[in-house]
Amino acid sequence: MIFDKRSPPKGTVRDWLDARAQGCDVGIIFPETGDVLSWRDLRDTARDMAQGLVGLGIAQGESIAIVHPNGKDGVLAVYAVLYGGFRATMINLAAGPDAIAYALDHSGAHFAFVHESQTATIKAIAPDGLTLLTDDMLQDRAGLPAFGPDQHALLMYTSGTTGQPKGVVHTHSSLLAGGWTTAVAHELSPADRGFCVLPIYHINGLCVTMMGALVSGGSLAMASRFSVSKFWDQAETAQVTWFSVVPTIISHLLHSDIDPSAAVCNRLRFGRSASSALAVETQSAFEDRFKVPIVETMGLTETAAQILSNPLPPGVRKIGSPGISYGNEVCILAPDLTPAPPMQEGEIAVRGPNVMVAYLHNPAATAKTFAGEWLRTGDLGHVDEDGYVFVTGRLKELIIKGGENIAPREIDEVLYSEPDIIEAAAFARPCKSYGERVEAAVSVKPGSDLSEAALIDLCQQRLGKFKSPDCIHFLTELPKGPSGKIQRLKLAALVT
């Protein structure tokens, strides 16, 4: 299989992994442990594991949950599931117990690869009938059935304004196309080595870095998590040529007193920023200090990550814009959901080979997300005379904290579970560290002794610390519109 920037990848992940295994080139290295997987070793182990999954009688296309942080075992689990023609169901470890339990149940997964650090949690919340896979269970191997590019490959849950996560389904074709759009935009080659510090249960970590390396024929260094104190040393040890991060990480690196060696900065062709808008001041200051160009991009779980990217230097990078489309088409939709004239503001929409098939078991949400062939992003913006997209706002009320989508209603529902709560609404407030932080406003019954600390503790027990409000404001009444609906977007300006 040969990377061709003119057309999206053909075949399946199995085909591409087989092709990469023809040589003994390094596939993925793990700087923290010193482990190295050649593409051949990765393919051989993934194939053996896949044959073991078939031997268990798991049906082709069936969901197999993967509950792993970044690491060798997690990578092998992902590739084994994909190689066997099963649907890799990535579980977000930061989602909180309620969302994890929902994803396991909604996906219909009967089997799961679970990291030892997550075993206790999964056993406590897993639906009946979920089997945790072990090496011993994969010893009885069977032949692998054939499947094509339209076979379901990935199921990844993303928060929406309805509160319940939606299961985004990608095929082998769209999953590979997600890595291809990255490779095209960033001119990746077999000589490149990406640095993956974002979790592979997030679409960025999985498609941009993992699939980008597979499609381009390059290699990857993977850390278990981002560490500001270790980032530059790991980049030097692994000899990476590019990295993909979110604005929060760029800010943390910028404000750290740790300086990388000149060799690291000279080797890095670029850094890539995604998931939320990057502040102009942060980007400029980072580039001035480290002399590493930052390429701002934009992507969605529904599009296997990237839809827009700024060109690499010496191409024109317009700071404040996530760039132009690569490998797909982007347009602006007017209120009637038809393409708008140039320079007019509207909803950003995308079509191309990297677009999802559907939301699992949710035809209504799927239909609402598409306007003909165009997938609606829920973001407002316009396209300038050079084809660069500028995002001007969001139609949805998602809170985007550190690049992760958080549905306010999910927090509302936890707050409403407390009997003394009359009204509740979570909302976003700008934050220098995370882009946005979570806050909430509530009104309570007269005479209630509910405290802010008690409500925050309730949220953390149900949702985990990441999704929970940093503070909760007590109001006599929350603002409402003519229909009586709480006006969430007014809350940030109303409370201090």
Image (spheres, helix red, strand yellow):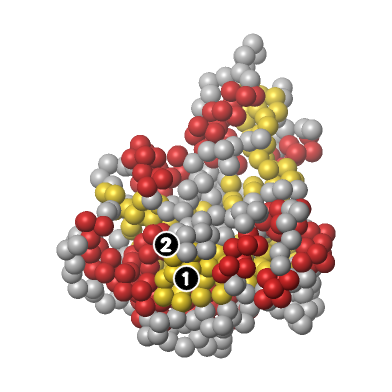
Mark toward the start of the polypeptide (2 vs 1):
1
Residue at 21 percent of width and 56 percent of height: 137
For the question of whether residue 71 can be seen, the reply is yes
Is label 2 in contact with label 1 (beta carbons under 8 Å)? yes
Q: Residues within 10 Å of mark 1 (few under 14, many from 20)?
A: many
Which mark is on residue 28? 1
User: Which residue is denoted by mark 2 in the rendering?
Assistant: 72
Marks 2 and 1, how far apart at CA: 9 Å
- Quarter where residue 139 is shown: bottom left
Q: Amino acid at mark 1?
A: Ile
Label 1 residue SS: strand
In the picture, the quarter occupied by the N terminus is bottom left
Residue at 37 percent of width and 85 percent of height: 22
Q: Residues within 10 Å of mark 2 (few under 14, many from 20)?
A: many
Label 2 residue SS: helix
Residue 444 position in % (x across, y down) = 63, 20
Residue 306 position in % (x across, y down) = 59, 69
Using residue 272 as the reference point, say whether residue 127 is left or right of it.
left
In the picture, the quarter occupied by the C terminus is top right
Residue 92 position in % (x across, y down) = 48, 51
